[in-house]
Image (cartoon, coloured by chain):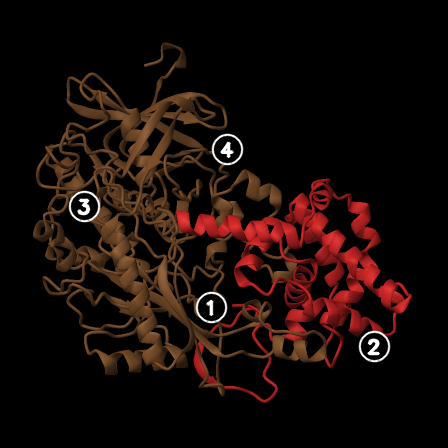
Amino acid sequence: MNRRSYIKGILALGTLSITSFSIFKWFDLSKSVSPEILLKKQRVIAEIAEMIIPVTDTPGAKAAGVDHYVIKIVTNCMSTIQQNKFISGLNDLEQYAIDHFDKEFIQCSNADKTAVIQYFESHSGFSNRIINKINNKLFGAPFYNKMKSLTVEGYCQSQLGATQGLAYDYIPGKFEACIPIQKNQKSWATK
Amino acid sequence: MNSNDKAKLQNTYDAIVIGSGISGGWAAMELCKKGLKTLLLERGRDVKHIEDYPTANLNPWDFDLGFNNTTKDIAADPIQSSAYSPADKHFYVSDAEHPYIQEKPFNWYRGYQVGGRSLTWGRQCYRLSDLDFEANAKDGVGVDWPIRYKDIAPWYSYAESHIGVSGQKENLHQLPDGEFLTPMELNCIEKHLGDSIKKDDSKRLVTIARVANLTRGWDNRGPCQNRNLCTRGCPFGGYFSSNSSTIPAAMATGNLTLRPFSIVTEILYDDQKQKAKGVRVIDTLSNEVYEFSSKIIFINASTIATTGILLNSVSSRFPNGFGNSSNQIGHNLMDHHSSAGAFGIHEDFTDQYYKGRRPSGFLIPRFRNLQDNENLGFKRGYNIQGHGERQEWMDKSGSITGFGADFKKQLTTPGPWTIWMAGWGECLPYYKNQVTLDASRKDKWGQPLLKLDFSFEDNEHKMMDDIRAVSGEMLEKAGFKNIDTFNYSRPGGSTVHEMGTARMGNDPKTSVLNKFNQMHDVKNVFITDGSSMTSSASQNPSLTYMALTARACAYAAEELKKGNL
């Protein structure tokens, strides 16, 4: 890292700590997350995933078992800080539902759930790209963004998602370099 | 020598080959075919073709955590985990178990198993040309190659004919054609880029990658099924590896003894005969120490590990390392850079798609400094490698806004065409870029750790700037939008083309090996892995190692017959 980008980094960090993280929250983030907490959240995780990728003419996230995938990833592939950030973001989302609709998220009507998700869809992340990058690097992506990308990953790599939501070609045999696209062409599930 | 190690002379062979990766497999096959009883030593476990590819037939959903590495894996293997995923982790070492010292950041990717990194290699096969073999002499950089293209050309043909290389003849001086199987095909966007580039500059062209993936059945293997899961090992034998090809061929002669779990710690020198007499080995299962003797030794442990063995083999004759009277062993470490390039999106051809997962991309052969004095501010050149495709869910998930049915529809339908491409650039041999041993730190077998001190210099950085600018221009002229030119600035080792630490040359005072990869100092020892490279050129080097190995084996067998070794 050269001196200039180092200074830029420090400045961005300074802004970040004022806008998004109090010192108390930092302490909160360094305690480890117990697996039971996540399992208690499984239903709401499944519900959020289904809002992101709902059942249509093809299966949705719930049927594809995305909630199981998300919990496994949070447990095994996230640092303590990232896990805490995920849980605390999830709590924020649930709290938002209670504050605005007087109900647990999973009990909300579809319209209310949509409003909750819409709020987090438009309020996750800083407007500044560099601060976003640094924030993501230090603390992991904001909860909603992480949840959305894990939902996509879990769905598109699940058996139902890959074979019905997308087009899965297990053993292609031949490579056809240029072919006309079909009506209602689905993406290939794998590269 | 340690008097406690109870080393005993267990076995005698005609030849010993150290390392079973891409060049070691070739050495074993060639020596066995010439009737030599050959011992092939491999420090890692055995990996049998097909039966030891546990993930080869798995679907994405068969992986519990998708293709994410666990935090535990990342902590234990900070370097290797940047290359592996749960799909091929078993073909990489653990950094925790196999530490090395980074004087400066250096990604040393390793696969300690029978077949080595031939299981996970990129399969690109390009010949060097006289532009490369003459470069050092012309520029006054390093030392002159002791061979020219005509010396190695028939051996390139020999190697290609054995492994099977698909590719397109282009009749270029800087990138000679080879013995090719039917080429794979460029897709729409790649053809479009090729047309645009050729129209703009007749010196440049886009050709399909030349790869060791079989477009038809070959040597009882393949053809490639276009699954693009090569690094898991191929149950169809669709690409070349030691495991699928050279080791079974060596085994079939009845002359091969394969000994996995065998770390070679030293080459043993016979003062009276002034030859190598054999090797010392630690059996990693029993921790016992063995000695094996042979008439000739081929060292193919991979550049950095080969260097370690040589530096660790000290004697009164060679106090600075085996065959090191030139004091060049460990120096001149090179790796291609492949960090700079460009990415762009194209809005046309939305009615076109493809079927199958071609396990290769395209190549723009070198077009810089083909004549002397192009005054670009840097010496030598680069080739550009890349691929075109339509954006799929993994590329789009971060950029599609919204959620619900519309989001799902966008996510699951093909996005716009894109091209990603980067320059694979030549790295000059710098004496200061080196591998040394640190005797103060030992691994779990009591062997000194290897210390890597490497950085790219001005010539490489200037070349990266050129690659970045030129790649962006080529995409722009071809009508791409949202062009992002980049330099990932990845450290040395990231291209996994380590080379140069026991270089070939004419003069024993400034080089380690002669024109037949034979040690100047010790005539019955040959080194034919990447460490023998006098310059790096810009081509992916494995094919050259294979050709040099076959050539050296023919020479060694002949010399042995004549009683010269």
Which chain is tinted red? A
Label number found at residue B216? none
Give the residue at x 80% y 66%: A47
Give the residue at x 11% y 65%: B371
Q: Chain of mark 1?
A: B
Give x and y (percent) for residue A33: 75, 44
Indicate whether B513 appears above or below B287: below
Which chain is tinted brown? B
- Mark 4, residue position: B97
Indicate whether B478 appears above or below B276: below
Element under disc 2: helix
Say whether mark 4 and mark 2 are on the same chain.
no
Label number found at residue B225? 1
- Mark 3, residue position: B534
Q: Tell me the amino acid under the disc marked 3.
A: Thr
- Mark 2, residue position: A111
Q: Is residue B402 left or right of residue B417?
A: right
Q: Nearer the viewer, mark 1 or mark 4?
A: 4
Examine the image and state in which quarter residue B522 appears.
top left
Q: Tell me the amino acid under the disc marked 1.
A: Gln
- Alpha carbon of mark 4 to alpha carbon of mark 3: how far? 32 Å
Q: Chain of mark 4?
A: B
Q: Where is the N terminus of chain B found, in terms of image quarters?
A: top left
Q: Is residue A34 left or right of residue B181?
A: right
Q: Tell me the amino acid under the disc marked 2.
A: Ala
Element under disc 3: loop
- Alpha carbon of mark 2 to alpha carbon of mark 4: how far? 54 Å
